[in-house]
Amino acid sequence: MAKKVTVEELLEKAKKPSKLALAYHPFYEGKVQVLPKCPIRSPADFAIWYTPGVAASCKQIKEHPEEVWRQTNRSNFVAVVTDGTRVLGLGDIGPEAGMPVMEGKSLLFKYLGGVDAFPICLNTKDPDEIVRACELIEPTFGGINLEDISKPKCFYILEKAREKLQIPVWHDDQQGTATIILAGLINALKVVGKKKQNVLVTLVGSGAANIRTAYVMIKAGFKPGNIIMVDTKGIVTADRPDIKAIKDEDPWKYELAQKTNAEHRTGNLADSLKGVDAVVAASTPGPGVIKKEWVARMATNSIVFACANPIPEIWPWEAKEAGARVVGTGRSDFENQINNSLGFPGIFRGVLDVKAKTITDDMCVAAAEELAKFAEERGIHEGDITPRMEEWEVFPREAVACALESIKEGVARIKPSRQELWDHAVAIIKNARESTMALMKQGLIPPPPSEEQVLKGSS
């Protein structure tokens, strides 16, 4: 059981990364850079890598466009695209203010997945312009990661970009979150001895994360009618007037309202938890959004994922005291962190390695099942149901699973063997990690100011 700490202690702990970030970001002037991947033995090599030698590669690509995947690094380039309208918990702060987050995403792509990712912060909020921007930059990239775009236009942008582009397009706030939630549910259900086909699950919050989570859960075999969705107005039902009114504006939520809640339950959040086996909350930071007495009315051996940051909708120990058997949060200092960084680096590694033309919810399911399998193989229990960030081997495992799913779905441009996929993913991820360590060891990435110095100066 998680150790009880005061709210003041948790808030102070939550402030520490922000204090360090304000010192470290200007110290390094950002988090990512471009480095060569080819040898430069002398200036004479520039005649190969640039003019005149490079013209030969240009001509070959002109004659055989598919050669771009072999002659350039396109198959490892990902654009992290945002308009800055829903950045973390900060809301609409604009593209410039969103830049540190996009750089951070690019850092995780590189270190965890060996993917060369670039922040693309757009000075528009128009969804069609964002889709058009993705079309315009498509020749440079092997994939596009949409990030921190407000709802409901994020659904429209993902759908339209998938239709128009011949490279994988993914929205991490939707698909990344859904992937790790599904992985957590798969193993949590194993721990409590329940079947996904039979359980009742309440999704608290009907934003991008839980809307896509519902779709991915259904793909994975959860019964749509056994899912209960809750928004700020209460339980989502097909006959609610406001749900009928959003049919054109938000058809994704409208469609789910027709499929879910087969028992036609009505009422508020408290009513949605009565007798359910699991609750997945991606809503308002707590504590107190979900109350102990509501958890106590859930089914025996219940599962609670309270994913709001920095404070979960209910403290983990309160959920445990109320009878929940498996509890997860979005925080790394509690057990069972539901962390979407376990998803996108490995998933993109996989689809890039087969030069896939798209990325689908079935690939999210494949990734989630591999994440769950990895954790199960090394042992799971109530307090440890998902892989941990330091278990780097999970990323090539996930990559292979997604690559094979791409081949199965017929969207892969090439079809390496399982062993070839594994060897390549391991090599490129190890290269990223070991290159970073080498730069640190040589002092080319200097150590940051000491934590004590920064925290003392900010107090």
Image (tube, grey):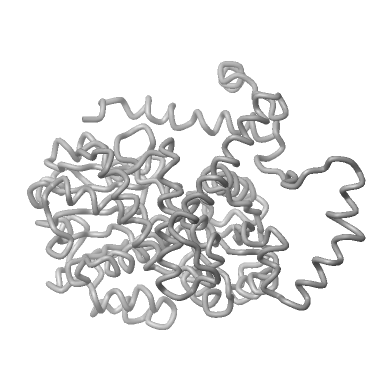
The image shows residue 270 at horizontal and vertical percentages of: 17, 55
Question: With 344 as the anchor, is 115 left or right in this view?
Answer: right
The one of 450 and 272 positioned closer to us in this rendering: 450
Q: Residue at x 27, y 63 (%)?
A: 230
Q: Height in image: 393 above or below 183?
A: above
The one of 61 and 139 positioned closer to us in this rendering: 61
Quarter of the rendering occupied by the C terminus: top right
Q: Height in image: 103 above or below 203?
A: above
Question: With 315 as the anchor, is 409 left or right in this view?
Answer: right
Q: Residue at x 18, y 61 (%)?
A: 196
The image shows residue 213 at horizontal and vertical percentages of: 33, 62
The image shows residue 183 at horizontal and vertical percentages of: 30, 53
Question: With 287 as the anchor, is 86 left or right in this view?
Answer: right
Q: Residue at x 59, y 53 (%)?
A: 93
The image shows residue 255 at horizontal and vertical percentages of: 32, 78
The one of 8 and 432 positioned closer to us in this rendering: 432
The one of 413 and 288 positioned closer to us in this rendering: 413
Q: Residue at x 67, y 62 (%)?
A: 74
